[in-house]
Each structure stands twice: as structure tokens, then as C-alpha cells.
Image (spheres, rainbow, N blue to C red):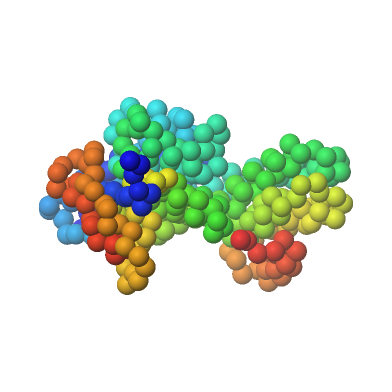
């Protein structure tokens, strides 16, 4: 007889993790001072993250040039542009460039939606890339720059909301 | 003083060396001393087989094996070293359908990039303090996907829950027979 489709097993694995972190000497929970310590550590490595982000922005610029000169036919360059913009989305804020994360997010969503980009689509990609380059060139940190915010909002209108 | 994280063994899996450095920096600041690294799912599985790991923090987009396939292998492969491994999926993929896909593959926690020390700490705290039971059902094996303790009004669907095989101790294997969602 076949088993009913609704059959489930509920398993409670032993919580060995709790035992590993609870040495019996300290209070329960996480030390609140740890967060401040971890935030400071992230701040300390920010220059390294910034260098990485700058390098990725340079790569994005070079890829955009390839996509433009091939009139959107260089699909390998477009795929790589997606990967780089995705990386910038993930690390821009950690480098202090929050708007790079925002433009990177918008750009990778836009690229993902394009099968065969034409002149208009390429122009929209380039607007993203130029905006990211401008943020880096001017060293605009945080997420409060009014011009950057206005451009990001306009581009996001074109790209649409994530689903 | 709170928990002592120095004995935790954490595996970071990300193809970005910079991202691994960032996560490792935060973990070290939190007191985690044993941090291992891999650049894709295949290498991570090898790492997992070479010694025990308590928590894996895994990127989604990697080659040749991405994070989702890594989760699938850990949860369901016959030779998996630890199907119950807590896995934090750390990714820039924040769209709802992708979050659901990660959840349905057996991810324990979801951590959106860009990460902050606070979000990483919160996910780790949740794993330590609120471990979820595992569910084995048709087409799914992983942490219980229902986190909210709702007053469930639907049909009884867990009435046939049976004691699990492979749990570490008989007590640990005791099934939860109630149909109500488990609070995470």
C-alpha cells in the first residue's frame, strides 16, 4: 500500500549549538557590547572594501563600453555586467557608498529583464553606470545625497519594482 | 558577559574573497575563532566532510555549485555529513519568490546583502536560541518553514507524524504531534 502524501516526520535535533556557546560561567544571551565591537571591526576594514568596490566600478565601466560598442550583442559582457552590478549591490553599503548599492540593485534587476537590449535599453544601463561612477568619483557616502536620490528614483521608475 | 562564541565552528562560502573577509572580520569580532572558508558549494561540501561545522554562511550565486545546490546536498544527499546543519543564506537576491525558493530548499535563515554586523548577529542569535524542528515531508526536508505561532484553523495535516529516524537520541527524536505551527 502506498504511503499517504500527508505523512510527515517532525524531528527535534539536539541543540548542540547552545551547549557549545554556553560555558556555564557566563550569563545567557549574547553580550550587548559585541555588536559595537563587530560594527567597529567592519568600519576598520572599510578602506579595503572601498578599494574592492572601486575596482568593480572600473570593471563595470569597461563592460558598459563593450556592450555599447557591440550595440547590445555582446551577451557575455551583459552577463558579466549583471554579476558586477550584483556585487556592487551587495558591497556598496559596506564600503559606505549606500547609493552604489541602490543603483547596483536597480541595474541588475534591469539587466535581468533584458533579453535583447536595443539603444534605449543600453542608454538606461549607461545611466546607471554613469551614476555609479559619479558617486565614486565624488566620494558621495551615505544615502542622503539629493541629486543621487533623485536620479535613483527616476531610474527605479523605469526599472520597476522587484517581485 | 554573554555566550562564549570562541568554540563555534563557522564555514563561510562565497566566491567573493572580499565578502569572505568582511564576514570573517565580523565573526572574529564576535569572538568566533574557528572560521573556515570556501569559494563555492563543491569546495564547501569537501570542507564540511573534513571536519565538523556548527553554522554555514552561504552565498547564493557561485560557480560551479551555487548556494542553493549546496543546501540541497547538505539536506538530502545520502552521504551528507550533517543534514541538520544550520545554514544562513547570505545573498543580494531579495525578491520574494527567491526567498521562498531558498526557504523551500531548506535554508535556516536568510541574510540580505548588504550585510551589517547587527543583521548577522541577529541571525546567529536566532539559530542559537530558537532552533526550529526539522520536517521531513514529501518533497521537503529542512527546518520547519512555519515560524509564526498562529491559531491554525485548517485541517489536521500532521496527525500522522511519526518518530524520526536518524535523530541523535531517542528523546531528541520525539515527534511533535500537534498540528499547530512551531514557534521559532
Q: How many marks?
A: 0
Which quarter shows the N terminus of chain A?
Answer: top left
Which residue is found at the position 48% from the left and 38% from the top?
A: B69
- Residue B152 visible here: yes
Asked where in the image residue A73 lies, by quadrant, the reply is top right
- Residue B86 visible here: no
Task: Give whichever of A95, B119 is nearer the camera.
Answer: B119
The percent position of residue B14, horizontal first and vertical second, equals: 49, 40
Asked where in the image residue B79 lies, by quadrant, the reply is top left
The percent position of residue A33, horizontal first and vertical second, equals: 30, 61
Extreme residue toward the left, this view: A24
Which residue is found at the position 76% from the left and 39% from the top?
A: A75
The percent position of residue B56, horizontal first and vertical second, equals: 38, 42
Which residue is found at the position 39% from the left and 46% from the top?
A: B138
Asked where in the image residue B177 lies, by quadrant, the reply is bottom left
The percent position of residue A34, horizontal first and vertical second, equals: 31, 57
Amino acid at each position: 500500500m502506498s504511503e499517504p502524501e500527508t505523512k510527515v516526520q517532525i524531528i527535534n535535533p539536539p541543540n548542540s549549538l547552545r551547549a557549545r556557546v554556553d560555558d556555564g560561567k557566563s550569563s545567557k544571551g549574547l553580550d550587548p557590547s559585541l555588536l559595537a565591537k563587530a560594527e567597529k571591526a567592519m568600519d576598520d576594514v572599510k578602506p579595503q572594501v572601498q578599494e574592492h568596490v572601486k575596482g568593480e566600478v572600473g570593471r563595470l565601466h569597461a563592460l558598459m563600453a563593450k556592450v555599447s560598442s557591440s550595440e547590445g550583442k555582446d551577451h557575455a559582457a551583459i552577463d558579466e555586467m549583471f554579476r558586477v552590478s550584483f556585487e556592487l549591490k551587495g558591497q556598496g553599503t559596506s564600503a559606505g557608498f549606500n547609493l552604489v548599492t541602490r543603483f547596483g540593485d536597480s541595474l541588475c534587476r534591469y539587466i535581468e529583464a533584458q533579453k535583447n537590449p536595443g539603444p534605449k535599453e543600453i542608454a538606461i544601463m549607461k545611466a546607471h553606470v554613469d551614476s555609479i561612477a559619479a558617486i565614486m568619483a565624488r566620494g558621495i557616502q551615505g544615502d542622503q545625497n539629493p541629486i543621487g536620490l533623485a536620479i535613483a528614483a527616476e531610474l527605479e521608475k523605469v526599472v520597476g519594482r522587484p517581485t | 558577559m554573554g555566550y562564549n562564541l570562541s568554540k563555534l565552528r563557522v564555514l563561510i562560502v562565497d566566491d567573493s574573497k572580499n565578502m569572505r573577509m568582511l564576514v570573517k572580520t565580523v565573526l572574529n569580532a564576535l569572538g568566533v575563532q574557528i572560521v573556515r572558508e570556501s569559494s563555492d558549494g563543491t569546495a564547501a561540501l569537501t570542507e564540511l566532510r573534513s571536519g565538523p561545522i556548527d553554522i554555514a554562511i552561504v552565498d547564493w550565486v557561485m560557480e560551479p555549485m551555487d548556494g542553493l545546490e549546496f543546501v540541497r546536498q547538505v539536506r538530502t544527499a545520502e552521504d551528507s555529513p550533517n543534514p541538520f546543519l544550520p545554514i544562513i543564506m547570505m545573498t543580494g537576491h531579495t525578491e520574494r519568490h527567491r526567498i521562498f525558493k531558498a526557504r523551500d530548499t531548506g535554508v535556516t535563515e536568510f541574510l540580505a546583502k548588504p550585510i551589517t554586523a547587527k543583521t548577522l548577529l541577529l541571525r546567529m542569535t536566532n539559530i542559537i536560541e530558537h532552533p526550529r524542528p526539522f520536517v521531513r515531508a514529501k518533497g521537503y526536508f529542512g527546518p520547519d518553514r512555519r515560524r509564526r505561532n498562529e491559531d491554525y484553523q485548517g485541517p489536521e495535516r500532521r496527525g500522522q507524524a511519526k518518530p524520526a529516524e536518524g535523530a541523535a537520541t531517542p528523546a531528541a527524536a520525539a515527534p511533535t504531534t500537534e498540528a499547530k505551527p512551531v514557534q521559532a
